[in-house]
Amino acid sequence: MIRVQAGLFDVGAEIARFTAGRTDIGAVASFTGLVRDRHNGETVSAMTLEHYPGMTEAELERIESEARTRWPLDDCLVIHRYGRMLPGEPIVLVLTASAHRAAAFEACAFLMDWLKTKAPFWKLEETPEGERWVEARGSDDEAAARWES
Amino acid sequence: MIRVQAGLFDVGAEIARFTAGRTDIGAVASFTGLVRDRHNGETVSAMTLEHYPGMTEAELERIESEARTRWPLDDCLVIHRYGRMLPGEPIVLVLTASAHRAAAFEACAFLMDWLKTKAPFWKLEETPEGERWVEARGSDDEAAARWES
Amino acid sequence: MRVRYFAWLKQRTGCAEEELDLPADVLTVADLIGHLGARHPRFAEAAAGRGVVRCAIDQQHVERDALLAGAREVAFFPPVTGG
Amino acid sequence: MRVRYFAWLKQRTGCAEEELDLPADVLTVADLIGHLGARHPRFAEAAAGRGVVRCAIDQQHVERDALLAGAREVAFFPPVTGG
């Protein structure tokens, strides 16, 4: 399942809900991305993620579906926020459940690499020098490229 | 930090506490291992983990310390239970925090591979046919071996 | 046809979206970029660097040789920066 | 010296731990396994497969040629199965 939302989410509550009442899941991997108060040595007071409503959801659905095809997942949840966020706030959560830990880890890393490179989000940082749009990073593209074999 | 305990832990609460009040963490990876109600096609009604008090804690400390040496972690938490556990209950939780997601993911996977192969725990399963001690699996040894380069 | 601009491209065009009637000789994304460049010189400047401006037709990523026929919405955006 | 047994090795020896005074010719872990095997035939049987019984001296993993001198506690256990 995927959710694209402006509001905060509670990582702990999401994980608790994810496994509640289930006895068939052996492994749950999670990744939480949080707003950092520094980037490239500069103070960041807030961050805004712009998205492309409709296209963003469709691409996340497609990514999640691909992960479920590649790995034997019992369940999968992607939550991604947009809008303005403050340091310490969660931006993205990926949860993967599987009978086996390698599948859970790999699917989670795969989804994060995609989210960081392919999902339609654009990042605006607020710094003491003003606002600036963040440029895409080569290292993230490389991280995503390793799944294209 | 490591904790070896008989009692249940709350995955959501642990993750919430892990990042509470921090604005310098960009990535949190987690892995939760849960008791499954089936193993190799057989029903498992309960599982008991025996440990070696003292040695188990010392080895977990050493493993966690090695992970902190290998990757730039802001924080790291390992909780491992021992004693009798029911299907659906959490057995182990690994949390890793870093500025960067690759470090968080890799350290978390590294710790889990070690915990599954090297930590002094022995698993007894209760099945309809009675109790049986689980044998160590080759695939887990291979997973741990990939970090020994 | 609706044309949408995302992130800093909005600052280059001065708008988030606009409705356009296209001349008959605007057939591909590349043609559209040329057409829009005449209206928005700072957009033209950005689009001259091939990797900097990406395009989607009806929310599907496309290359610059993609045909516009039947498109309801064309979007231009910089490389995504993720979450 | 205290000798401890874990997991199914306890069923082979009938005890979780025992206090022993060792003969002077028991110098290494291998010697100790031989000595214990005389008391616990089903332990001897398990220990004959090298990979099946692991050993720690004072909570440090050791091989069978490790010396016992100074050891307070020797533990025998099967390969760990993790969490």
Image (spheres, coloured by chain):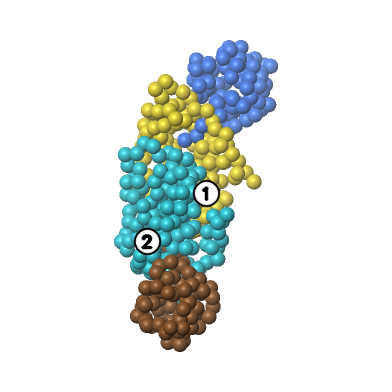
Chain colours: A yellow, B cyan, C blue, D brown
Q: Position of residue A140 (x, y in %)?
A: 55, 37
Q: Residue at horizontal 36%, vertical 77%?
A: D2
How crowded pointer 2 is (Cα within 10 Å; few <14, some 14-19, many 20+) is rated as some
The answer to whether residue A90 is left or right of residue A144 is left
Vertical arrangement, residue B63 with respect to residue D42, above or below: above
Q: Amino acid at mark 1?
A: Ala
Q: Residue at horizontal 57%, vertical 21%?
A: C1
Q: How many marks?
A: 2
Does the residue at mark 2 contact the one at mark 1 (Cβ under 8 Å)? no
Q: Which residue is mark 2?
A: B57
Secondary structure under tag 1 reads: helix
Residue B103 in view in this figure: yes
Q: Residue at horizontal 53%, vertical 63%?
A: B141
- Closer to the eye: label 2 or 1: 2
Nearer-the-camera pick, A143 or A83: A143
Q: Position of residue B26 (x, y in %)?
A: 43, 39
Q: Residue at horizontal 41%, vertical 61%?
A: B59
Nearer-the-camera pick, B30 or A110: B30
Q: Amino acid at mark 2?
A: Glu
Nearer-the-camera pick, A19 or A127: A127
Q: Residue A107 shows which numbered tag?
A: 1
